[in-house]
Structure formats: structure tokens, C-alpha cells
Image (spheres, rainbow, N blue to C red):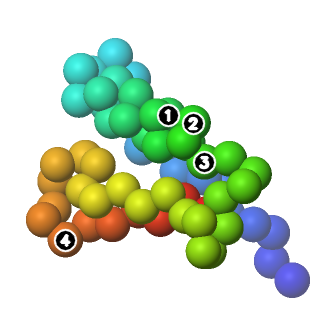
Amino acid sequence: MPAPIAPMNQKIDTDNAMVQNHNAIYQQLLDQIREDNTYTHAVITLNPYGTAPLSLYPGV
């Protein structure tokens, strides 16, 4: 079996304002997810990044 391919360095600038904003939004979404979130009690976030009118992120 071949060895796994090493991850590619995408050279994301972590000091970029947009990257920091998206990271903050992502962290807020993760902070909303708790152990009591289930498929019947899920956190639903519509278009959290403001990038697509039909994006949906369920947190279970």
C-alpha cells in the first residue's frame, strides 16, 4: 500500500483580516455545539460567512 501524501502547504496568511474573521466565526460556531446537541436538537446556522445565499451548517 502506498504511503499517505503529505499535506499541501496552502500558504494561508493567518494575519489577513478576512482569514481572522472567518476563524472567529468558525470558533463561535464550534462553541455553540454541546454534548446535548443531537439530530433532533441540532444547532442550525444559515450562511454564517455571508458568502452564499444557500449555505447551511448543522452542528451535531
Horizontal relation, residue 53 to residue 26: left or right: left
For label 3, the residue is 33
Q: Please tell me whether mark 3 or mark 4 is closer to you in this view.
A: 3
Q: Secondary structure at mark 2?
A: helix
The amino acid type found where label 1 is placed reads Gln
Dividing the picture into quarters, in which one does residue 31 lie?
top right
For marks 4 and 2, the one nearer the N-term is 2
> Residue at the top extreme?
15
Kind of residue at disc 3: Ile
Residue 10 placed where, x, y %?
Answer: 42, 43
Residue 11 visible (yes or no): no
Seen from the viewer's position, the closer of residues 59 and 42 is 42
Question: Mark 4: few, some, or many residues within 10 Å (few <14, many ≥20)?
Answer: few
The kind of residue on which mark 4 rests is Leu
Which residue occupies the foreground of this view, 37 or 51? 37
The label number, if any, that marks residue 27 in the structure image? 1
The answer to whether the residue labelled 2 contacts the one labelled 1, judged by CB atoms less than 8 Å apart, is yes
**Distance of mark 3 from mark 2, alpha carbons?**
6 Å
User: Left of 50 or right of it: where is 26?
Assistant: right
Q: Residues within 10 Å of mark 3 (few under 14, many from 20)?
A: some
Kindly identify the amino acid type of the residue bearing the numbered disc 2: Asp
Q: Residue 31's mark? A: 2
**Circle 4 — which element?**
loop
Residue 1: percent from left, percent from top: 86, 83
Check contact, mark 3 vs mark 2: CB within 8 A.
yes
